[in-house]
Image (spheres, rainbow, N blue to C red):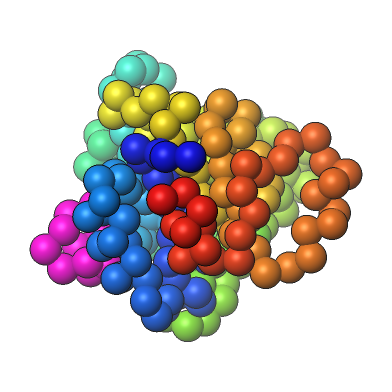
Amino acid sequence: MRFKTLLLDIDGVVCIRGVLIPGARELIEQICDIGINIIFITNCSLHKIHHFQEKIVPGRNFQIIDPIDVLRDITQKHSHMYKNDSIVIGTKEIRQKISDLGITIFNYKYSDRPDIVYIFEKLNYDQEDLIKISRFVLEGTKLYCAGLDRLFWYQGSVYPGVGAITEQIKYMTKVNYFVLGKPASPIFELAMNNDNNPEDTLCVGDDYEIDIIGASRCGLKTAFLTEQNTSELSKVNIHPDFIVRNLNELVEKIT
């Protein structure tokens, strides 16, 4: 089976615990040389902020699609809905990127109830801050999150993922949230806006619930990278098109 485009997750596919997998750079260059387009699709906006796309293969500039790109697309289409007062929980760089979209960001420590709260990556989530955010949500503030990842790695250390933090707020408030990144459809749909044909596109990830279910629901072919026992997959309704141990094994199957 030949694919024209690969949608590659970053963490767990080309990086492990925040470090580039040995041989990944050469493998990605090989994929490009045979004419397959690579688009990275990730819930971690820090990858783009830290110019991962320029570091993976020097001399090649890869597109990275992340939750901030989804938010940009939404605000352009529905500007009247997303120019409201907002609070962003995330790193300083992420807050600046969202501010650049024209979204008014307030300091949550001193703000009255905002219209929207956005949850993004942050190395240290302050529990008192999350309680205050939860109170805003109980009072009617809308809750958006970058994705549903349980954890993420940064410079070799593991941190709570946006999904873990958002689920904590949901558990306290019993209020649903809107997901910008995977496994929700907007990030996959944005990746397919580049005239990519779903039949010619393969989404590659190492998280069944985040990557495989999300992409499959958008009609995409999927490849699940795992070294774990996959017998449990026989009990689920959505099955990956490929199950492999690593990216190198996948390339051997599709080229």
Quadrant assignment, res 14: bottom left
| Of 228 and 32, the residue lying toward us | 32
Percent of width and height locating residue 8: 43, 51
**Residue 62 counted in the magenta span:** yes
198, above or below 27, in the image: above
- Can the viewer see residue 235? yes
Extreme residue in the right direction: 235
Percent of width and height locating residue 170: 72, 44
- Can the viewer see residue 142? no
**Residue 124 counted in the magenta span:** no
Percent of width and height locating residue 181: 50, 42
| Of 177 and 209, the residue lying toward us | 209
| Of 242 and 62, the residue lying toward us | 242
First to last magenta residue range: 49-63
**Residue displayed at 80% across by 35% down:** 237
Left or right of residue 156: residue 172: right
100, above or below 115, in the image: below
| Of 69 and 121, the residue lying toward us | 69
**Residue displayed at 61% across by 48% down:** 242
**Residue displayed at 88% across by 44% down:** 235
**Magenta highlight: main SS:** loop
**Residue displayed at 38% across by 54% down:** 45
* Total labels drawn: 0
Quadrant assignment, res 5: top left
Left or right of residue 106: residue 174: right
